[in-house]
Image: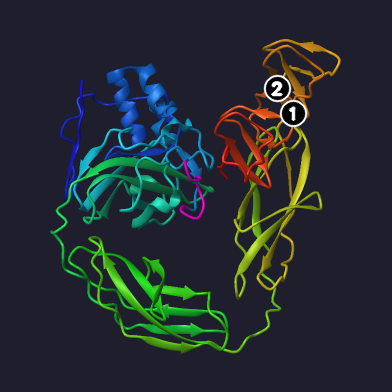
Amino acid sequence: MKWKKTIGKGVVTAAVLSFGMWVSAGDASAHGYIQEPASRGYVGSLEKQVIGWQAAMEKYGRVIDSPQSVEGLKGFPERGPADGHIASAEGGLGQIDQVMDRQTADAWKKQDLKGGLNTFTWKYTAPHATSKWHYYITKKSWNPNEPLKRSDFELIGTVNHNGTPANTNLSHKINVPTDRNGYHVILGVWDVADTPNAFYNVIDVNLINDEATDKEPPSAPASVEALSVTDRTVELSWGKSTDNQGIKEYEVYRNGEKIATTTNTVYKDSSVMPETSYEYYIKAIDFSGNSSSASRVVAVTTQKLIEDTEAPTAPSGLHSMKESESSIELMWSPSEDQVGVKEYAIYRDGQLIATTSNTYYVDKNLQPATNYTYTVFAIDAAGNVSASSSSLEVSTLSSNSSAEEWSENKIYTAGMVVQYKGLEYKAKYWTKGNQPDSSDAWELVSDAVVEWNVQKAYPGGSKVRYGNRTYVAQWWTLGDTPGTSAVWKLVE
């Protein structure tokens, strides 16, 4: 049995879908997926009825039974799934196999799609309170034979919501660009309002556009003005442009050079110097890539340098999103500062363990069933430090393992499992006296990423932490330092 969809400009329609209603036991749990046009995971759930469960599992992974569960941290594109794991959301809190991240020009079924206004319809199995949906498409220059990266995508539409359940907003009208043809990937992101998470759905499409259709440029942005000018910032605003197909974005130019693109009609330039003159103008870009003429030029001079002695506000809302036997995932609300927060310092039990520019941090390599206390401080570019966040006490989960503790005096044969420093290891072959965290005789079976050890051999696919970053081995390696050798690929 074959299936195909043809999607025309103005509305999304199903030409043939002869499977009837797909039902899964997982459908009753959570959370949602794009049904029209079908997301990659939903395509897999349909295809399993044609090629069988085992073949579909090998091609798509567990998503065939749970297309509604491709979940990760929200905040895309600045945060969320890591490069190479956008389709599965494994870079965030994803629960779906990473086989979904396989990316070649012919790896996935594609649905014909015409540019212009198209309808995207969601299927909600748990209609969470929602803040917004946002949609992206791969750029003209993307490489379909490389893993999907955040930088491959550009925003094509945002649908804001008021925090009520998602099922009050099933379908969204989104302008798909008409300035490109062939294989592209559309990414739909559903941001949940009352959790740190979002749902990520990629859609593989074959764009069919007549590039000569829209040659009409937008009108130039009007009423450009400087809303505020300080020693370190210039905030601009302008009136909306008009276009026969709609405005995709605005380009901001400073002294003749493009410095930013935005979908808003305001922009704050925080990269200026004190007592310096600048000239700004704005251009509007439509969904066919046509550019308007430049707006009028706005000339400004920044103020004299003002010494920054004001500390940021204390981080608020510090909480744990998830605990395991060996890790705790922290998140907090951003601090405010008159210039801007540079980074956050994370303390565990009174000791500094990390700094990050994000508002989340995963503390790894912890002991099972252990209490930890965390606080977070905000630091601005001038080095001013905020007051402490409220302290958070949280415990790692207990180990339910019945495995015995490793002993250097005992002989272990292939398949035997031991505990060592709170983690489980399985013997790959006969071994005695070889420490599990440093010997190739042992394979880590616990769901944890451990620090790289120069004495340990790692097979392809092994993950390690080094310099507060996560790397995956692309082939067998021993003694090659992550970050300096091509054998290690940065994943976080």
**The disc labelled 2 sits on which kind of residue?**
Tyr
Contact flag, marks 2 and 1 (Cβ < 8 Å): yes
Badge 2 density bin: few <14, some 14–19, many ≥20, Cα 10 Å? many
Q: Where is residue 115 in the image (x, y as percent from the top left)?
A: 20, 52
Q: Nearer the viewer, mark 2 or mark 1?
A: 1
Residue 27 lies within the magenta run: no
Residue 224: image quadrant is bottom left
Magenta stretch: helix, strand or loop mostly: loop
- The mark that comes first in sequence, 2 or 1, is 2
| Image quadrant in which the N terminus is located | top left
**Residue at 69%, 47% in the rendered image:** 467
Inter-mark Cα distance, 2 to 1: 8 Å
Q: Give the vertical position of 362 relative to 43 (above or below).
A: below
In the current view of this chain or complex, which residue is farthest to the right?
409
Residue 451 or residue 39, whichever sits in front: 451
Residue holding disc 2: 425
Give the structural element (helix, strand or loop) at label 2: strand
Residue holding disc 1: 437
Q: Position of residue 361 (x, y in %)?
A: 64, 49
Task: Answer whether residue 400 is visible to the viewer in this image.
Answer: no
Boundaries of the magenta span: 76-84
Please give left or right for residue 363 compared with residue 220 in the image.
right
**The disc labelled 1 sits on which kind of residue?**
Asp
Residue 110: image quadrant is top left
Q: Position of residue 76 (x, y in %)?
A: 46, 52
